[in-house]
Image: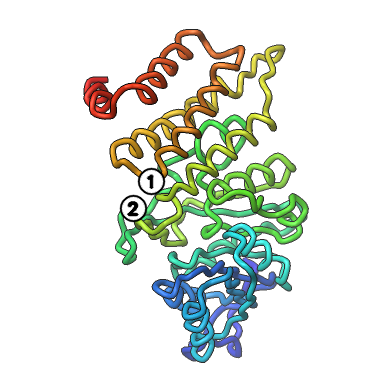
Amino acid sequence: MNYEIVPEALNKKGSCVKEHKYTLTIVIPYYNGKKFIERAIKSVNNQTIMASELIVVNDGSKEDEKAYLYGLKDQYDFKIIDKENGGQGDARNVGVNNATTNFVCFLDQDDFYKMNHNEILLAAIPPEPNNMGFIYADISEADGDGNIISTSMVKDHSSHPKVTVMECLRRDMFILPSASLIKVSAFKSVGGFDTSFTGYEDDDLFLRLFRAGYDHIFLDKSVTVWCIHTESTSYSVKMSRSRMKYLIKLMQMFPDEPARGRYYFRELLIPRFQHLVINDYITAIKNNSKNKDELEKLFLNYYKMVISNLHVSKKEKLKLGVFMLMACHFPKRLFLIILRFR
């Protein structure tokens, strides 16, 4: 183990905590999150191994939300960095660029750590971590109030640890920054988070770390509570936009290689993304969403990608084409009736 009990190392409650030889920064992006932020900060301050520093990056919050955050500094020890709104990925990058430690962990403002989050992740650092990129663990799913629904979100939704790039592309990677310990030098070497994304930026980062050849370790333990609620970005049109951007980026990164029998788009990307693109559009039609036109454009862009790919079968193209004609040209009521019987 890389830690020892140090009597003088005390948390704010005055109880003895463990000290680790590697230094750790926690970064929390904050955007109009006063409903949840104190719970997140408390979880960082209640660790069995304390981080060296906690940085909360205020990503252009409203004045009253900003004032609330500053008010918490009277009770908790953390640093605030104020910046113009640039999204969660940009806020995380700013936090890492201001970190003074070997390793970094992230925490979303509406989630919280279990008490041994830091201890479990730090204990897994190998004796010679020169090529170590990241260590990640499982995560518990909860509702907005923190009531647990599942304790194995990561393991239940994907395969771990990652061994091939095909495993990284076949489905969402389910490597959550809030349950990960990342080496700062590795993070910076791949350019940090891609700030053009407002969803899938996590998958994109860890895919680039994997492709850069960094070692990683998966721990079959839940260390963080991920609170999923209707205010989450996952439920907004931002996720749909970002999904399409990420799909396009993956197509550019992984063009088909017929000579090697590798058809990334047909065999990996279509099964992963097509049902999501279609379901977003169907949901918008059913709910007569104000974003229906935008989601229709995203669907049509996806349709063009499929039609133009030489390696997708005519049968699959025809099925998608029929759906496209019905969705875009049939009366809404008739289209919804047809959907019931598909």
| Residue of label 2 | 150
Question: Residue 84: x, y in percent?
Answer: 63, 68
Q: Identify which residue is drawn at 35% across, 20% down.
A: 326
Q: Identify which residue is drawn at 48% across, 14% down.
A: 317
- Which element carries disc 1, helix, strand or loop? loop
Question: Residue 302: x, y in percent?
Answer: 52, 28
| Residue of label 1 | 290
Q: Identify which residue is drawn at 37% across, 56% down.
A: 228
Q: Quadrant of residue 288?
A: top left
Quarter in which the N terminus is drawn? bottom right
Q: How is the image coloured?
A: rainbow
Q: Mark 1 is on which residue type?
A: Lys
Question: Residue 12: x, y in percent?
Answer: 50, 88
Whether residues under marks 1 and 2 lie with C-beta atoms below 8 angstroms apart, the answer is no
Above or below for 28 versus 178: below
Above or below for 137 versus 23: above
| Mark 1 vs mark 2: in front | 1
Question: Residue 250: x, y in percent?
Answer: 63, 34
- Estimate how packed mark 1 is, as few (under 14), some (14 to 19) or many (20 or more) residues with alpha carbons within 10 Å: few
Above or below for 137 versus 17: above
Choose between 170 and 130: the one closer to the eye. 170
Q: Identify which residue is drawn at 59% across, 86% down.
A: 9
- Which element carries disc 2, helix, strand or loop? strand
Choose between 177 and 33: the one closer to the eye. 33
Choose between 308 and 35: the one closer to the eye. 308
